[in-house]
Image (tube, rainbow, N blue to C red):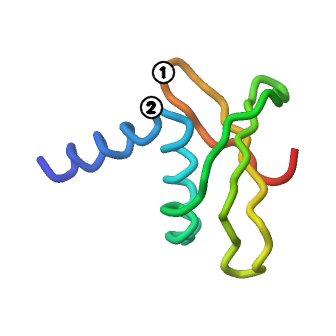
Amino acid sequence: MLALLLGLGAAFGTLLSPQLAIRADLLLRVQPEAALLADIDRTDIVYRGMRYYGIDRGRDRQTGNSLGGFYVKKVGPLHFVQASGAP
């Protein structure tokens, strides 16, 4: 039970910042190198309430293409990745 609570706490803790939410999404997509090495930069691009974050030094393992970036939506204190791709 304690392990479950700690796991849930860690999962919600990653959603407290947009950069950690993006890194968690990359780990869920089985992109551990990109999750650890990518430079995540906030941009001024906002689309339908989602802020765009650009990714540098991140490559898709399957295609070899650059990851581009992620659209992150803030709901209360939490951040959720809504989409990925180019702006």
**Residue displayed at 44% across by 31% down:** 16
Q: Give the vertical position of 55 relative to 58 (above or below).
A: above
Quadrant of the rendering where the C terminus is positioned: top right
Check if mark 2's residue and mark 1's residue have beta carbons within 8 Å: yes
Residue underneath mark 2? 16
Q: Earlier in the sequence, mark 2 or mark 1?
A: 2
Residue drawn at the location 31% of the way across and 45% of the way down: 10
Give the vertical position of 66 relative to 76 (above or below). below
Does residue 59 sit above or below 12 in this rendering?
A: below
* Kind of residue at badge 1: Pro
Side (left or right) of 49 relative to 4? right
> Residue 68, position in %: x, y?
78, 56
Residue 39 % position (x, y) = 60, 52
Quadrant location of residue 45? top right
Q: Residue furthest left?
A: 2
Q: Position of residue 57 (x, y in %)?
A: 66, 63
Dot 2 lies on which element? Answer: helix
x and y, in percent, of residue 2 in the image: 12, 47
Judged from the image, the secondary structure of the residue bearing numbered disc 1 is loop
Above or below — where is 12 with respect to 37?
Answer: above
Mark 2 and mark 1: span between their CA atoms?
A: 6 Å
Left or right of residue 47: residue 4: left
Q: Quadrant location of residue 38?
A: bottom right
Q: Residues within 10 Å of mark 1 (few under 14, many from 20)?
A: few
Label tally = 2
Amino acid on which the number 2 mark rests in the picture: Leu
Query: Which residue is label 1 attached to?
Result: 77
Camera-nearest residue between 78 and 57: 57
Q: Going 56% across and 70% down the picture, which residue do you hit?
A: 31
